[in-house]
Image (cartoon, rainbow, N blue to C red):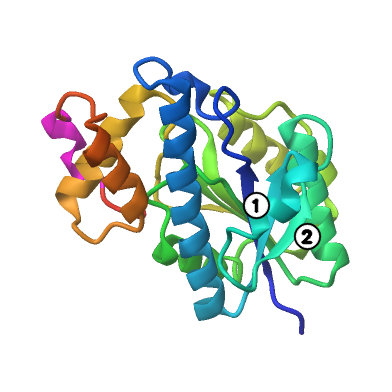
Amino acid sequence: MRPGWLVVFAKVPVAGRVKTRLTPPFTPQQAAAFYRCLLADALDVSSASARMLGLEAVLCVDPPPETASLVAQAPRGMRAIAQQPGPLDVRMTRAAQQGFAAGAPFVMLRGSDSPCLGESAIGDAVAALARADLVIRPDRDGGYDLVALGPAAGRAVDALFGHPMSTPTVLRDTLDHAGRLALRSELLATGFDVDRFDDLRWLAAARHADASMPCPRTLAFLDEHRLWPAPASPRDASVTADG
């Protein structure tokens, strides 16, 4: 049997095109450098997870002409594909379809801006696919940073992702579609991504609670440039790596 796919969605880290909601207080150049660290950490974790779990690690690149240049910076052995034109739901659908067309028994899609998404959560998603058609790791903003599709979800992926992404209701919308498609869904522990400056408080809290963080470049960048927000409130202290 061919291995399952673990797909990392990535953008080329160009100032003014990535992490724009962090500016200000970040400059566009700092935002691009910060995203470069996020991406490098995500690729390292995904590559290591793929080796441990017997998956194929796949880098899905936007914009397509930069695919070769970005994969040259990725860990050795990662396959590279280009993101297809269109909104995010279309790009996710096409990436999943490409994996199933290549013979993958399941496809996992993850973002590149979730610094605490580590090997444990990826392993939990693989295990959950034994009892569910769709496995999702929710974000605290109403979305998700990891979605795993078994064969039944793969066959229905056009309808499953047929709604706007990057909205406060994207998790609910996806689960609603899954219910209408009679797919068995399972949620993992909640994580978070970093889109806005305040989101860094979640990362600071996770670091305080767990010293073994899967994002060393990201933490070092924030330390070096002193770009952390004010200390997290006590209620945030329960956040750990992997959610």
Residue situated in front as seen by the camera: 78 or 111? 78
Q: Write down the region rendered in magenta.
A: 232-239
Residue 80 horizontal/vertical position (percent): 73, 59
Residue situated in front as seen by the camera: 49 or 106? 49
Q: Residue at x 83, y 55 (%)?
A: 97
Q: Is residue 36 magenta?
A: no
102 lies above or below 84: below
Question: Which numbered tag is attached to residue 152?
Answer: 2
47 lies above or below 7: below
Mark 2: which secondary structure? Answer: helix
Q: Residue at x 62, y 74 (%)?
A: 55
First in sequence, mark 2 or 1: give its number.
Answer: 1
Question: Which numbered tag is attached to residue 70?
Answer: 1
State the quadrant of the N terminus.
bottom right
Q: Amino acid at mark 2?
A: Ala
Q: Residue at x 40, y 66 (%)?
A: 120
Question: Which numbered tag is attached to residue 122?
Answer: none
Residue 127 horizontal/vertical position (percent): 53, 71
Q: Is residue 74 left or right of residue 64?
A: left
Residue 78 horizontal/vertical position (percent): 65, 67
Marks 2 and 1 sit apart, C-alpha to C-alpha, by 32 Å
Q: Amino acid at mark 1?
A: Leu
- Closer to the eye: label 2 or 1: 1
